[in-house]
Image (cartoon, helix red, strand yellow):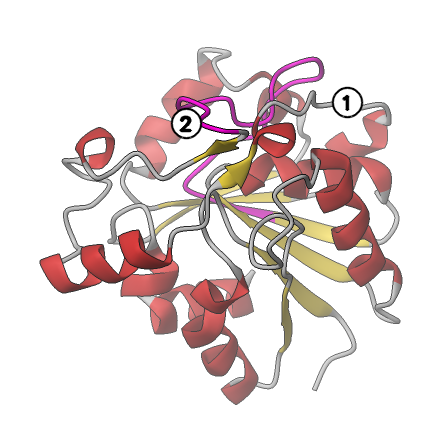
Amino acid sequence: MTDEQIVLLGGLWLDASAWDGVVSELEKQGRRAVAVTLPGQGDGNTSATLNDQVRTVLAAVDAAPGGSVVVGHSGACTLAWLVADARPSLVSKVVMIGGFPQADGDFYANFFPIENGVMPFPGWEPFEGADAADLDDQVRQRFSDAAIPVPEAVAKGIVRLTDERRYDVPVVMVCPEYTPTQAREWLDAGELPELAKAKHVELVDIDSGHWPMLTRPAELARILTDV
């Protein structure tokens, strides 16, 4: 088993258990995977902040003797990028699944209404179409029942990026509900400013909706092993 670890960061409303299938597959392939329980997303801390989440992931990266591949899903693509910014010498690669990093000064994930200090799962209407096409009614219900409201101080946290060495860290964009061709068009058009500055960006396709860790865990694990 390699010393390099794969650090898995779930997107909005997910706790670490969302990665169970992927972790199992990675371990079968001899890879060491760590699904991080993010403050406010699995520990009951509704007052957690974005900085709390960054510090938690940095602790996992700092504890790895052989470096880390940091994997962010959806909104947590920005979290993975913040970790690369803070530890460019310890993060060997960043994998972004179904998302892109926000720029310095942006809100982290201020996408849906805040209610009583948290951003609850808004239901399936915003995700109808390619995002949720591969989720049947049973999976949707399980997801909705388990969805963890995101603390306001995470969703409205301000992204702070300070070390341009992050652009030296190779990035792999895993493209689920959109194609690598579409992602390349967005890059070329300057619509993804942080990734447009990255020196090494690889685009990988996966035939899934927005949550491939739930619907294609074995295929996603193979992709993570390959990269």
Query: Which percent across, then down, holds residue 111?
Result: 43, 23
Q: Can you tell which quarter of the image residue 69 is in? A: bottom right
Query: Which percent across, then down, holds residue 218?
Result: 36, 74
Residue 121 in view = yes
Instruction: For the C terminus, give its image quadrant.
Output: bottom right
Query: Which percent across, then down, holds residue 31?
Result: 62, 79
* Residue shown at 24% from the left, 40% from the top: 131
Could you say which disc has been placed on residue 184 in the image?
2
Magenta residues span 95-116
Q: Can you tell which quarter of the image residue 1 is in? A: bottom right
Residues packed near mark 2 inside 10 Å, few (<14), some (14 to 19) or many (20 plus): some
Residues packed near mark 1 inside 10 Å, few (<14), some (14 to 19) or many (20 plus): some
Q: Does residue 96 show up magenta in the picture?
A: yes
- Up the image or down, 113 lies above or below 16; here it is above
Q: Nearer the viewer, residue 84 or 49?
A: 49
Q: Main secondary structure of the magenta part?
A: loop
Q: Is 1 on the left-hand or right-hand side of 116? A: right
Kindly report which numbered mark, 2 or 1, lies closer to the viewer in this rendering.
1
Q: Which residue is mark 1?
A: 160
State the SS at label 2.
helix
* Residue shown at 32% from the left, 53% from the top: 206
